[in-house]
Image: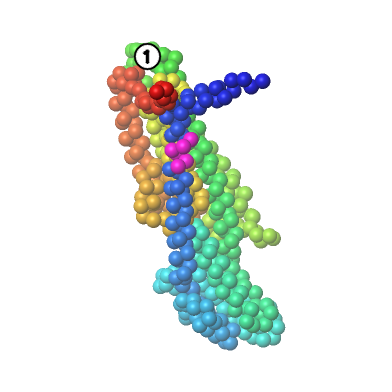
Amino acid sequence: MLKGFRNVVVKELKELLRDPKILIGIIVVPLVMFPILGFVIRGSMESTQERLQTLEVGVADFDRAEIGENLTKFLKDVLKVTLVVIDTSSVENAVEILQTETNATDLIVIPLGVTENVTQGKPAVIEVYSVFTGTGGIAESASSSVVVSFLESFKRVLEPDPFKTVSKSIIKGEPAPVSPDVLFSILYSQVFALPVTISVLLVFSMQIAATSVASEKEEKTLETLLSLPISRFTILAGKLAGSIIVAAVGAIAIILGFNYYMGSFMLIGGVGVPVDLEAIGLAPGLVGYAVLGASVFVSLLSALALAIIISAFSEDVRGAQSIVGYLYVLIMLPMFIIMFADFNSLPFAAKAVLFAVPYTHPMLAARAAFTGDYITAAFGVIYVSAFTVALLYIAARLFATEKILTARLKFRGFRIRRKKPS
């Protein structure tokens, strides 16, 4: 029934192995991309572990009684925690001192009356404030959990449940009655959704631009277009104008979708705990939307210009799509790193490489819109704009010559030869 099946399989394998584009896409790219991704994530995890081993914790004891004294002694002598005692009279002052005069990112607050309430069997609360920047990733979340576990260990040496531990956050230098876990869940929902959306938009845009030029070369209509009594710069400008419109529409779509997406979190927190992100200063403002829109726009424009240049070196649509496909690593790798790794804790070399990749910056801008770190995002817009101008210059030089019609990018195939019988 399947007579000749083996011969057909062998023939197909030979044809596939002769095509270097398939070998690069299926074998080389995974062998390069995943080790790089693993190296970056491992570096991030190691940096997080080192940070936790040298963790400093601030303590503001407003009660100045037995519970606070015993807790401080337990943390120092038993758990060997590096404590920074903050002598002040209010949480606001303690938070300010924590951020300006110490390296600690977590603050234990022992309110007035805790010891009395514990002694009388009344409800007592000890608060843990954790600095939330939205850029520390795993380390931020881990440090908050570690400090809470310290208090749980202390509770076990006292009476059963002598006090309740309440986790709160420090946002942009101000204390906020929101659990860090809630903020991290919202942040990472945003971090997962936006990079994927931006990556898909970049990929589709590059495919469309590459197909547009390559189809004209394949159907020989590009020669007719170039022979019209209009300058080639006008032709290029027209193509780029179309690309700009597509980029602008894509950027607007991202902003509108992001606005609706973030609006869904405005009143969603933990179970029965509403969270208004605007009230605590984490809702994207006008500046955030403007920076994100500008970053997405210039990144889309650069992707479209790059696709137009590359498609000029292909003979047909299939070849253009294959060549453009190699560039997807520059989009997908930053996406995975932003989603799963702690960017701030990456090695300097890894950061430098990621910053050099233009398609990293719209994903960083997405996070900046949430956290308010606009300096890095603005630098990204400037950098990607310069990169785009360079690409447009190359495209203009390419269209000004006959290379737009004759340029080819060929890969030498691999041949599999049978040994001749001796």
Which quadrant would the N terminus be assigned to in this image? top right
Whether residue 146 is visible to the viewer of this picture, yes or no, is yes
> Percent from the top left, x then y, of residue 236?
36, 24
- Colouring of the image: rainbow
Q: Quadrant of residue 235?
A: top left
Q: Which residue is mark 1?
A: 223
- In the image, residue 102 sits, relative to residue 362, either above or below, namely below
- Residue pictured at 51% horizontal, 49% vertical: 339
Q: Amino acid at mark 1?
A: Glu
Assign the magenta stretch its main secondary structure. Answer: helix
Camera-side residue of 393 and 410: 410
Which quadrant would the C terminus be assigned to in this image? top left
> Percent from the top left, x then y, of residue 379?
37, 48
Q: Quadrant of residue 165?
A: bottom right
- In the image, residue 124 sits, relative to residue 247, either above or below, namely below
- Residue pictured at 59% horizontal, 23% vertical: 5
Please count the marks in the image: 1
- In the image, residue 352 sits, relative to residue 95, either above or below, namely above
Is 88 in the magenta? Answer: no
Give the residues drawn in magenta, as a range.
26-31
Look at the numbered disc 1 and give the secondary structure of its residue. helix
- Residue pictured at 39% horizontal, 51% vertical: 350
Whether residue 297 is visible to the viewer of this picture, yes or no, is no
Left or right of 299 on screen, residue 7: right
> Percent from the top left, x then y, of residue 125?
63, 76
Number of residues whose C-alpha sits closer than 10 Å to that of mark 1, classed few (under 14), some (14–19) or many (20 or more): some
> Percent from the top left, x then y, of residue 297?
44, 38
Left or right of 264 on screen, residue 350: left
- Residue pictured at 50% horizontal, 40% vertical: 198
- In the image, residue 248 sits, relative to residue 147, either above or below, namely above
Camera-side residue of 199 and 296: 199
